[in-house]
Each structure stands twice: as structure tokens, then as C-alpha cells.
Image (cartoon, rainbow, N blue to C red):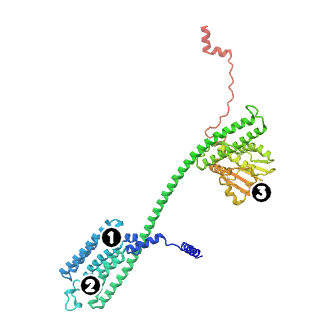
Amino acid sequence: MDDNADSGDTASADSSNTARPAWPREGLKSFREKLLHGTVNKPEFEYELLTMFARNETSAPFAMPALCFIFYITSMFWASFTEATTWIALVSISRVYMLDQCRRLLSIPRTEVNVGQWRRHFFRIELVNGFALAAFALIGMSLHGNHLGEMPATFSSHVFIFATLMVVLAIRMTFASTLPSLFLAGTVPMTAAVAVRLFLVGNPFYFALASMAIGIHVFFVYLARGLHSTALAMVEFRAEKDSLISELEEATAISNEARRRAEAANKAKSRFLATMSHELRTPLNAIMGFSEVLEKELLGPIGSDVYRDYAHNIYQSGDHLLCIINEILDLSRIEAGRYDLNEETIRLTDVAEDCQRLVKIKADSKALTIVEDFAADLPQVWADPRALRQICLNLLSNALKFTPKGGRITLIVGHTEDGGQFLTVSDTGPGIPKDEIPRVLQAFGQGSLAHETAEGGTGLGLPIVQNLIHLHGGTFDLHSELRKGTEVTVTLPPQRVLRPLSPLQPLGQERHRGPVAPARPPRQPRMRTAEAYNGDTRYRAAGDAR
């Protein structure tokens, strides 16, 4: 009992574990990488933001040094040469070191970069750079008297320092917006130094100016956060795009591989069918030929009617098997796209009449009535005669199989409203349930009532008809009502109907001929008298000569 209980508890625990949604593998991997690199976002995103900062710094290496040199020249008006030179030296050293480290980061392979360590390293460098810039607001304060409020700096120097703070905030926000912590490290010291200097003046105007400096710094912080969000979104979209491209390439590779395998399988199928066609037809022809010789006793009597019946059954079975093989091969060629249409001009009514004559004997044996309804004066069509005969014979054969004795089969040939032509075969058989029609149209598919009433078949007739009419660009329609009958219609498009062209110029009214001249009356010969002959010098000269 205890073992069973334990096994039941184990099974329930397993089922509960299976029922609980598991932590996605990708999410666990991402969380592990965040802990490893010490970042908030995905390490690959943080790496992109870090390299964007490095590229921003290296893209304009002389922007900040040039501005600092201008500040250095201007500071000579209120600071000593030693203080100003010391300040420009500190700033230059910190900027050169920052540029060197940015170039180093860009030269290191992605796999060897620890994002957290490099981010902290840049933070320390930027903090040193921020204190170096903050010293600009403090130089010159040693020249005052006994207290800090009596600095010799003029109004213009304080305003210039305030403007310098604005320029530094704008530049650092542009370069370091991808890493907000670096932006704060590089600007907070200078803002604090400027505010302290302005507060120490002790003038209400400078109090307002110091407050404005702090407020502007807060505003730039919000702008930097917005730029950081935009950069992060851009990196995420780029990652999604790269992921989609990789997925598309993978799907393309899988599709190409599947197509290659399908082509190989199709070739193997074609070789197999060709081999089986030869291997099956050759012995079948021998079986059918020898059975026919035995049945007709061409080489002498076989002595027993039972043997003659056996030979007849052998011939019929071989003929049935040969028909099945031909149908399978035809369907395989159609599906493989290797069925070539040998098109020529033909009348659809002639095809229907020929097929009706072929099945009439079998229809009479089942006491079935075949009703023909052909439209008069139908023009010829451009189609494959063999394919059209196979379509009509398959439809008539199906109707003969499923129509009970004494039933009626209707064969209709006519034209459609858009100028095409159609062939319809309807019967009074058991019909097909609506839910079984898709199965009937599949290869080797048969309805449930067919097994009870039909004489047998492979279920390839309708699929072959459907594929052959589609090769002609036509349509196939099947309508059936249970226990009332089935109607199948195949339609050839108007493009395959050949219509006689009317003459461009009616006979006798051709424009290239001129008007017909009226007939001239025949000329009457003139009778010459003797006097006329005597007066003719030609005849007179002839008489003198005589």
C-alpha cells in the first residue's frame, strides 16, 4: 500500500510539474548572462550601446579639445596662467586616455569583451574627466581677498562660465546619451562647481543663475534619457531584424533542402514507376495473350469448358490489373508535371459520341438508358483528344458502376455563357454524402455507399479527370444528392474554343480593287468592196507585180 501511495504521489508530482509552465530556456539564458555581465538589459544590447558611445567619441576626437582650448584662452582674463595651464593639461590627459580606451574597445573581438567591466571602466574615466572640467569653474577663485565673495571676476566671466556649462552639457549629452550613467559622471561635477561659484558671489542675480544652471542640467538629464531610450529601441529593432533575417535564411535553407529531397524523391519515384511499368506490363501482356489463346482455342481444343472459363477469368483479371497500372501511371505523371498535352482541333460532341458507343454494350447489359443531349453547331476546341476521351470515359464508367439496374445516365454537351464548352454526366445512382466529397476527389478515395453498390474500382477516376481538365485550364464541378444521383461537369475555357473569323472585307467589296469598268460590246468586222481593194496601193502594187 505504501509503495502504491508513493508511486501515486510521484506520479501526481510529475503531472503537476508537467502542468506548470516551465521557465523558457531563452529567458533563463538571458537572465544568466545579465548576472554574469552585471547589466540591466541584455548583454548584446549593452554591448551595442557601449560601442555606440565609443564610436561617438572617436568620430569627433578634436571637438572637446578645441573647445577646451578656447576656454583656456578666455580664462586668462580672470585666472592666472598657472591655473589655466594646469586645467588644460588635466583635461587633455583625461580626453586622450578616454579616446585611447575607446579605440581599444573597438579593436577587441566581441567574445572577449566583458560589458560590465568596460562600462565601469568608462564610468571612472568619465568621472575624472568631469572633475577636470569642473575645475574650470573654480580657477581664479584664489585671487580674491579674505573672503570668497570678493572675487575679481567680472560679470562677463560668470556669464561665460555659465555658457560654458551649457555647451559642455549639450556636447556630453550628444556623445554619452547611450550610457546615461556616463553622462551624469561627466556633467554633475561641473554643474555643481558652477552652482557653487555663483552662489558664493552672494548676489540674488547669481542665485537665480545658479538655480537656472541646476534646472537646465535636470532638463538635459531627461533629454539624455529620451535619447537613451531611442537608442535602445533602435538596437532592439536591429536585433529583431537580424533575428528575422537569420530565421528567413534558415527557413530558406530548410526549404531548399526539402525541395532537393522532394526532387530526389520525385526522381526516385519516376524511376520506380518506369521500372514497375516495364516489369508489370511485360508479364501481364504475356498472361493476357496466352489466356486469350486458350480461351479462343487457337492451337486446338482444350477439352473442357471449365478451362475455357478459367482462361476468360484470367484474361479479365489481367486486363483489370493493366487498367489499374495505367491509371496509377497517368496520375503519377500528372502530379509530377510530366503529362504532355498533344493538342489539336476536335469537336467535343464527337468525343462524347465515341465514348457513348464504347460503353453502350455494358449499359445495355445492366438495362441502363443513356440519354444524349448535345447542342447543335458547336465549334471545335483546341485540346488533347486522348485526355478528353479519358475524361469522358472515366465519368461514364463511374456512372455505369454506381447506377443500379434500370437507371438513367444523361450525357450533355453544350456551351457556357462566357463562350466556353462543357460536358456533363449525371446519373440516378446512390449519390455521395457532402462530407465524403473531398475524400472522393482524393486518390484512391471512395464513398461509404460505393462499397455497397459499386462493381469495384481503385478510386482514381475522378482525381485523373480533375487533373486533366485543370491541365486544359478548365474547371471541375461535382454536385451530388444522397439517394438521388450525382452530376459531374467539366468545363473548357473560352480560350480553347475555336471560332471562325469573319472576312475583313466582304466578297466583291474589297478596297484594294478599283471600280469595275462596264463591258464593251464586241467589235463588228467591216466588209471591203472591190473599189476599195482597187484603191489600195498595196493591192495595186501586188497586181502589177503579178
Q: Secondary structure at mark 3?
A: loop
For residue 500, say whether it is visible: no
Q: Nearer the viewer, mark 1 or mark 2?
A: 1
**Identity of the residue drawn at 45% across and 72% down:** 28
Label 1 to label 2, Cα distance in Å?
Answer: 33 Å
**Badge 1 amino acid:** Ala
The answer to which quarter of the image holds residue 292 is: top right
**Badge 3 amino acid:** Lys
What residue occupies the far top of the structure in this picture?
A: 546
Q: How many marks?
A: 3
Nearer to me, 189 or 311: 311
For label 2, the residue is 158
For label 1, the residue is 54
Residue 171 drawn above or below residue 347 = below
For label 3, the residue is 484
> How far from the left and from the top, in percent, is residue 323?
68, 44
Residue 211 located left or right of residue 11: left
The numbered mark, 1 or 2, whose residue comes first in the sequence reads: 1
Label 3 to label 1, Cα distance in Å?
Answer: 82 Å
Nearer to me, 545 or 231: 231
